[in-house]
Amino acid sequence: MRRFVTSVLAAGVALVIMLVAQSGRRAIAADESSLLQIDNEFVQDAAKDDKAAVGKLLDADFTWTDADGKTQARADVLKSLPTPALGNETGAQLKPRTYGQVGAVMSGRGKVHVLRIWVKRPAGWRLIVYHEVALGQQAATAAGSGVNDCQNPCKTVPFKPKTEAEQAIIASWQALETGVTNHDASAWSPHIADEFVMLGSTNDHP
């Protein structure tokens, strides 16, 4: 009898875990679907140079960085909307991901890649970062000698975190940079997500 009850309880726990997992997957899928929908709205509005429509989708802290490394704040972008490197993104490959209140869409075609980071505000998704990269745009330079003692950001940063979350982010970043400085992959890798990819203007591929 005890074995039967234990088996039933185990099966019940397994079913709950499965249902929670399925619910979580559905929530992620719904988030990604809504993210892709509004991301497409932004892409089409930007390609048509529709400043009014684009402005409704931008966060107050929005920045746009083009393939040449020029960064503009929201007000400057809405004065003169930059030309998107991928246009209306016909034929581009999209990779959306959501992380709770944050969403990211990477779009690429050929050597040009764009990363858009969205934040979920009370009014809905708002674009906070737009960043372009053109692979192989610049010639690679010889590697420098590096640093032996990394002070900023490994040990100190000119920023005072206001919340525990901000403190945790700073701590993780400092540990990551310390791993980079020491060429220590084992110290670096715990702070890098599985979907991490590096894109650079001096590289010819991701």
Image (cartoon, rainbow, N blue to C red):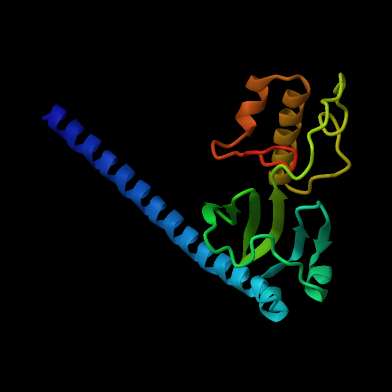
Question: Does residue 63 appear left or right of residue 196 in this picture?
Answer: right
When the figure is inspected, residue 135 is found, relative to residue 1, above or below; the finding is: below
User: Relative to the observer, which residue lies in front, 41 or 32?
Assistant: 41
Residue 156 falls left or right of residue 101: right
Q: In x, y percent, where is residue 140?
A: 78, 34
Residue 124 appears in the picture as rendered: no
The quadrant where residue 174 appears = top right
| Residue shown at 81% from the left, 29% from the top | 154
31 and 45: which is toward the camera: 45
Q: Residue at x 82, y 75 (%)?
A: 79
Reply above or below: 19 against 54: above
Q: For the image shown, how many numbered marks are present on the structure?
A: 0
Q: Position of residue 167 (x, y in %)?
A: 74, 41
Q: Position of residue 62 (x, y in %)?
A: 75, 63
Q: In which quarter of the image is the N terminus?
A: top left
In the rendered image, the vertical position of residue 158 relative to residue 81, given as above or below: above
Quadrant of the snapshot with the C terminus: top right
What residue is rendered at 82% in x and 31% in y?
141
**Residue at the farthest bottom position:** 52
Residue 16 in view here: yes
From the viewer's perspective, is residue 166 above or below residue 176?
below
Residue placed most toward the observer, 98 or 87: 87
Pick the front one: 103 or 158: 103
Q: In which quarter of the image is residue 53?
A: bottom right
Q: Which residue lies furthest to the left in this view?
A: 1
Residue 149 drawn at (x, y percent): 87, 21
